[in-house]
Image (cartoon, rainbow, N blue to C red):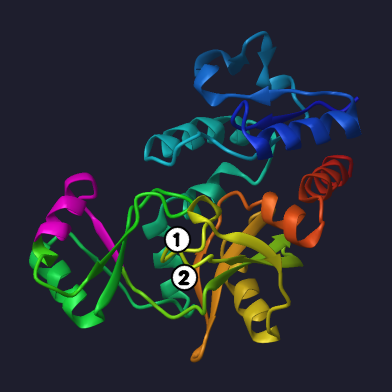
Amino acid sequence: MLKIGVIGTPGGWSSEKLADTVARLTGFRLLIDLQQVVFDFSQSKAMYKETNLFELDAMIIKKVGARYSPDLLDRLESLRFLYARGIKMFSSPEKILRVLDRLSCTVTLQINQIPMPKTVITEDIQGAIHTVEAYGDAIFKPLYSTKAKGMIVIQNGSNVREQVEEFQKTNPIMYIQKRIDHKGKDLGISFLNGNYLATYARCSDGSSWNTTTRSGGKYEPYEPSAEAIALAKRAQDLFNLDFTCVDVAETDQGPVVFEVSAFGGFKGLETACHIDAAEKFTEYVIREISK
């Protein structure tokens, strides 16, 4: 019996689904909450309750915390020790580290000339104000967030300084993007082992500037252009994750990339495309560790 642990969030839909799928296909179920792991580097032990993680055949990393924050980088560093000692992980901690931070991901995409919305990074209040004036509509994004949490739109107007100062209280390094016309939808273009899997669209219900499901957006099936798929493939190739989703918008000027996901989404693929990504991912992992 293969012993594959799932690193995730107990009670979280995608984490529980993945752990259930691993149990169905292998007969072994272990959903690991990293908050409860004791890493003993001197003895090469990583204890989760009664299980030494070094005894597992592999681990699938679905989530490293319920809330995105810099703390997750430290959790990934601890996992990197296990990975260096020979524990197979999907995706590896080193690969996830490069995309978890929005700025790190953006720098890699920009160095490799991946088309993105216009983006400015600054800690300077006046520089941020000038950016809003230049963009007209600007989206201010935390460096660590998902599903648009903490993001705000600031429009050029009389109270720009107050809004910028308020945002910077919790976001010293400000990540600012020009708001683009994505025609009410953005795309999740998904890949497994670098191979195109499927695409779903997140469609706005018109009540919010963003398309996330927490703001009323709905998942729908979608067939993107060949150009959009090719661009997403170029973007994800830079990180070589085992399973990922590239957030893309199709604009009048061509497709642009928002980000490459550290963990990829199961819900959109299942709801819109009727694809069980948890099963496909687990089958892939089993094949890899059985070679």
Q: Image height check: is 150 above or below 159?
A: above
Mark 2, other Cα within 10 Å: few <14 / some 14–19 / many ≥20: many
Q: Is residue 22 above or below residue 168?
A: above
Q: Is residue 243 above or below residue 183?
A: above
- Where the C terminus falls, by quadrant? top right
Most distant residue in the bottom direction: 253
Q: Element type at marker 1?
A: helix
Q: Marks 2 and 1: in contact by CB < 8 Å?
A: yes
User: For this rendering, which residue is in front, 253 or 220?
Assistant: 220
Residue at (89% x, 31% y) in the render: 24
Image quadrant in which the N terminus is located:
top right
Q: Which residue is mark 1?
A: 105
| Closer to us: 52 or 16 | 16
| Span shown in magenta | 162-176
As shown in the figure, which amino acid type bears the numbered disc 2? Leu
The disc placed on residue 109 is: 2
Callout 1 amino acid = Cys
